[in-house]
Amino acid sequence: MNTTPATTASPATSTPLWVYALLAFVATAGFFYINIMSAIVDGLVTGWGFDNAQAGTVAAANIYGASAGALTAALVVRKLRWRPTLALLLGVLLLLDIASVAVREPTPLTLLRAVHGFVGGMAVGISYSVMARTQSPDRAFGMLLLVQFGLAGLGLMVLPPLVPTHGAQLLFMVLAGFSAVALLALPMLPRFDDAAAAQDEQRQALTPTARRTAAFALLAMFLFQGGNMALSAFIIGLGERFGLARDFISHTLGWATWIGALGAVAVIAMGTPRNRLHPLLVAFALTLVGTAAFFWSGSKAVFFAANVGTAITWSFVVPCLFGMLSKIDHSGRLATLAGFVSKMGLASGPLLAGWVLRGGGDHALIATALTILALSAVATLAGAHRLDKESAP
């Protein structure tokens, strides 16, 4: 396995927390729409009159486009200078979000958001390649989830109640504003080595054992993101169909997302752990229990607790998986590839959920998400066990 320490020639080897935070903010701009996807899907349904399948298709196209962009980034990242490339991509994202305000038909909006996703996916992939070369990738990706969940909590608490009055266009303007702020933050990042220079020092090929471990982690990422997003994208409507008020649901999602950031804080505090299996075992136990609890969403207390529990594990497991892949390959290529796989899972979740809801209802959706997450647990724990064993002294 390629476990050579990260290069000491770069500032990334002594990265302070504020740099992690800025990197996380810039990366988040490329896919913040994913973090408020439930608000966007609900806004398309309640604000613009889309049905569930149409709204789910728009969401899926946005994230499938991001998957294609992330894959493209994985292929070309060695040839690009990360700072000017990110500046260009963020500027295009800003324009695409503004354009989305004027498009009210499902098919044109689906195409536009697919292009938006592609551009954002490239921006995120390039950001991931930089984060993977920091001294502690686990900590870098933990900060990423902390920033995402903190901002998403605010968005989910504030935005859904405004959609019936202001329409879904409000959501796209918020996304445009986020891209604008990220553009302003980009020059404050310190100078990092370009991906090509970093990879010149990382030419060692992965061993067959390392490739198998990486395959487990990538499969786990796809299933985990897909299972979570299948439920999350339609959680507002699910809560309403269980008899909960919109204001309560909105505030629940906001508080759950903020509290859920504790999972990312735990990853930042752990840094790069020697034993990954045991904390991940606890995290997946909480994930499965929390997801199953959505069967009793008619209870406000259960609905709140289920959202909090699954949010904590979501922000914990994802950076752990990125950290596993960064440990296997310090060049950042696997982390960039994981961005592609992650977005494929996030895109597949809403698409599958829209059709499950059309054919089977809320209980079928919860059961589907639970099954997918259980399969992710198997893949994650298998990969973590192999990595712990291979990394042991």
Image (spheres, rainbow, N blue to C red):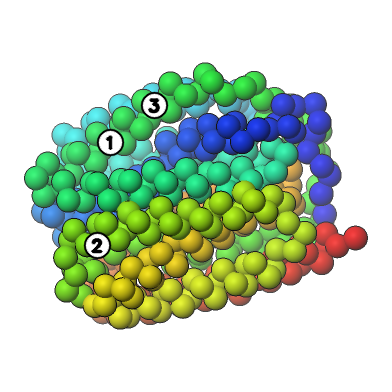
Q: Earlier in the sequence, mark 1 or mark 3?
A: 1
Measured from the top left, where is residue 74 in percent x and y? Answer: 59, 40
At mark 3, the secondary structure is helix
Q: Are marks 2 and 1 in contact (CB under 8 Å)?
A: no
Judge the density around disc 2: few (<14), some (14-19), many (≥20) Cα neighbours within 10 Å.
many
Pair 2/1: label in front: 2
Measured from the top left, where is residue 293 in percent x and y? Answer: 38, 78
Q: Is residue 358 left or right of residue 352?
A: left
Measured from the top left, where is residue 32 in percent x and y? Answer: 39, 42
Q: Which residue is mark 1?
A: 174
At mark 1, the secondary structure is helix
The N terminus - image quarter: bottom right
Query: Residue at image x 67%, y 54%?
Result: 270
> How far apart in space, not on screen, are marks 1 and 3 (Cα)?
11 Å
Pair 2/3: label in front: 2
Q: Three-letter amino acid code at disc 1?
A: Val
Q: Which residue is mark 3?
A: 181
Q: Nearer the viewer, residue 355 or 7?
A: 7
Q: Nearer the viewer, residue 27 or 93?
A: 27
